[in-house]
Image (spheres, rainbow, N blue to C red):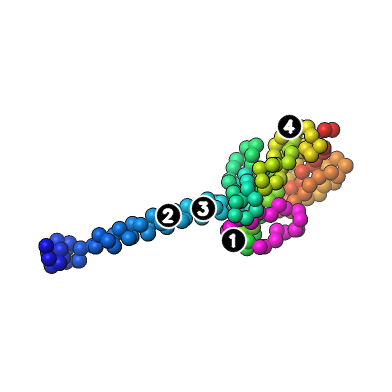
């Protein structure tokens, strides 16, 4: 078949070259795999108020997974998302800062509920996870005050407060 016959069979347009189609198909597959890898390595985009499970160390192995706030392993709530991988969170030292390979910093606060106890999280990133109410390093949340950063509403003023979103956790040692 001549090139003129191929042109006539396709309505006057040259027949597509199989090699070009194969290269295009491979390019689409490579882009899809690369996109998936970026998603897995950097975690899905998180937004303020969302609860997340964080494992791994800060940096390359950090894994951020959105989770139901009632889940025992949802160890953090996103307080604020700051543009820039090196950008500080408001009121430095108050939030736990998570930086993956993306271009944002997650300003994290603990995901805690009234009446529950929390102990150190040993899965790599740190923070607190729900635990039995025993042990020196374990705390019990006696009250959660949404919309306020004032710890004076806590017994003996013992609390942890965060400005964004404004919330105060009143805590006592779990052994009490």
Q: Position of residue 59 (x, y in %)?
A: 62, 55
Residue under pointer 4: 132
Q: Position of residue 8 (x, y in %)?
A: 13, 64
Callout 4–callout 2 Cβ contact below 8 Å: no
Query: Could you tell me how far apart the alpha carbons at marks 3 and 4 are, in whole angstroms?
Result: 34 Å
Whether residue 155 appears in magenta in the rendering, the answer is no
Residue located 78% across and 47% down the image = 160
Callout 3–callout 4 Cβ contact below 8 Å: no
Q: Position of residue 110 (x, y in %)?
A: 71, 45
Residue under pointer 1: 103
Quadrant where the N terminus is found in the figure: bottom left
Q: Earlier in the sequence, mark 3 or mark 1?
A: 3
Q: Position of residue 122 (x, y in %)?
A: 69, 42
Which one is in front, 101 or 158? 101
Residue under pointer 2: 32
Q: Earlier in the sequence, mark 4 or mark 2?
A: 2
Instruction: Give SS at disc 2.
Output: helix
Question: In the rendered view, would you say 1 is above or below 170?
Answer: below
Callout 3–callout 1 Cβ contact below 8 Å: no
Residue located 70% across and 58% down the image = 89
Residue under pointer 3: 39
Specify the quadrant of the image occupied by residue 105: bottom right
Magenta range is 86-102
Label 2 Cα neighbours within 10 Å, binned few <14 / some 14-19 / many ≥20: few
Residue located 59% across and 61% down the image = 103
Query: Could you tell me how far apart the alpha carbons at marks 2 and 1 are, in whole angstroms?
Result: 21 Å
């Amino acid at each position: 078949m001549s090139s003129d016959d191929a042109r006539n069979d396709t309505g006057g347009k040259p027949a597509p070259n199989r090699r070009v189609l194969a290269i295009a198909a491979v390019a689409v597959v490579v882009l899809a795999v690369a996109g998936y890898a970026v998603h897995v390595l950097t975690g899905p985009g998180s937004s303020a108020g969302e609860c997340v499970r964080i494992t791994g160390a800060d940096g390359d192995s950090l894994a951020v997974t959105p989770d139901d706030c009632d889940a025992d392993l949802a160890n953090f709530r996103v307080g604020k998302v700051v543009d820039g991988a090196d950008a500080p969170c408001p009121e430095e030292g108050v939030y736990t800062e998570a930086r993956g390979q993306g271009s944002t910093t997650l300003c994290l606060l603990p995901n805690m509920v009234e009446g529950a106890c929390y102990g150190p999280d040993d899965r790599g990133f740190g923070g607190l996870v729900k635990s039995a109410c025993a042990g020196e390093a374990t705390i019990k949340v006696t009250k959660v005050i949404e919309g306020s950063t004032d710890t004076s509403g806590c017994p003996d003023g013992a609390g942890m407060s965060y400005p964004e979103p404004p919330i105060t956790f009143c805590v006592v040692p779990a052994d009490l």
